[in-house]
Image: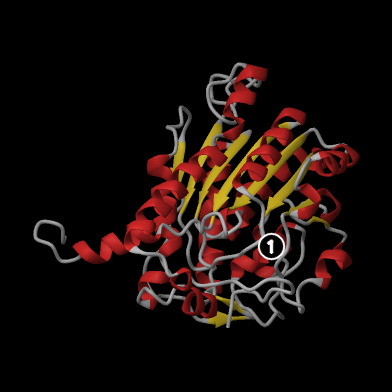
Amino acid sequence: MRRRKSSNARARTYAELRLSDDSVDVFFAGAEAMLTRVINVSAGTRHQRLGRNDCFGSVHGDPEIGAVHLRLISPQWQGAGSPSVHALAPEFAFEVARRGYAVGAKVLAAVLPPHDGPTAAVPVSMSDDGLEERDGVEAKSVVVKQLSAALEILRQYQPVRITTLGGECSVSVAPFSELANRYGDDLAVVWIDSHPDVGTPNSEYPGYHAMAVTALTGHGDPDVLDLLPAIVSPDRVALVGLHVWTEDDYPNVAEWGIRAFSPDELQVTSETLLDWIFATGCSRVAIHFDVDTIDSNEVVLGLGAEPDGLTSEQARRIVADIDRAVDVVGLTVAEFIPRQVMHLQQVVEGFPSLDN
């Protein structure tokens, strides 16, 4: 069973790519470099336009006096449902594979440019406690507890800008809800992802990461919704790069009034997306970037291989165009699975002087 079935494409496991050892080395080096380029794409435009010295502003550079740009490290892994982990990362032991998103958050924090504002880490359990499914959501007790912890951090810092390094897709729920609480109807969300993430507790797939947009738009589990300081109206949410879904969830996109853009619609120009942003009347945008958006024919960055998505250059252009047009107050990078790092961890496990 896959995370989500595709109506027009089939996700592949990393092992199915059958890369040689040499090609894996080249592949991973290219993946790291490409991911860094995509994430850093707006640094130049933001610096040129506003004179800021990091991608989305800084404590010293924001126009608001004393404004805080928070970098939030959120290595949550529990939202990835067991069925998808079993199916898409068979080269690892299950207990290793399911925690891959936590490793990805640490790698992102290590390789991306340093942040000159405050950085906070969401406390995320690495134990097996609370992973059982409840009310149609796997690991519900853990994800609700960690959502509450993330929101408490945000209340303490009161940031005007938030950059979040995940972790699976649900790490955007807390920061985007906080930004919605601050900016109200002036905030739109651009969700760059191969998948819609509009699952509900009634869906076949129980992974909470597939319910992130659901929560942000005021649908889904009531215990999650009770914690959120604000939601985003579905007509101010755009799904960008969408081309993989399950038939039980996909109708929610149209039913809730969410706008979707396929990779083909944005292949040459971002104009239709920018027109949509302007039509919302919003001057601020929060961008969620799931790395599985990038066409797996180019590079595999996520848990599964999703072909025919956006290319890295298209993703860079889309983010840069948004950044030129409006004020990007939120950015999340999510769902990175650093496979070679995880393999290395297994190789050196038990080496002398490395075990605690």
Quarter location, residue 213: bottom right
What residue would you read off at disc 1?
226
- Which image quadrant: the C terminus? bottom left
Across and down, in percent, residue 120 comes to 45, 42
Circle 1 packing at 10 Å, graded few (<14), some (14-19), many (20+), is few
- The percent position of residue 220, horizontal first and vertical second, equals 72, 69
Give the image quarter of residue 290.
Answer: bottom right
Q: Is residue 254 left or right of residue 149?
A: right
**Relative image position of residue 302 (x, y in whole percent):** 52, 60
Q: Which of the 4 quarters of the picture holds residue 296?
A: bottom right
Left or right for 31, reference 219: left
| Camera-nearest residue between 54 and 131 | 54
Q: Residue extending furthest left?
A: 352
- Residue at screen point 58% across, 83% down: 1
Q: Secondary structure at mark 1?
A: helix
User: What number of labels is visible?
Assistant: 1
- Of residues 94 and 151, the one nearer the viewer is 94
Please, what is the three-letter code of the amino acid marked with disc 1? Asp
Looking at the image, which is closer to me, 134 or 195?
195
* Residue 229 in sight from this viewpoint: no
Seen at 72% across and 44% down, the residue is 181
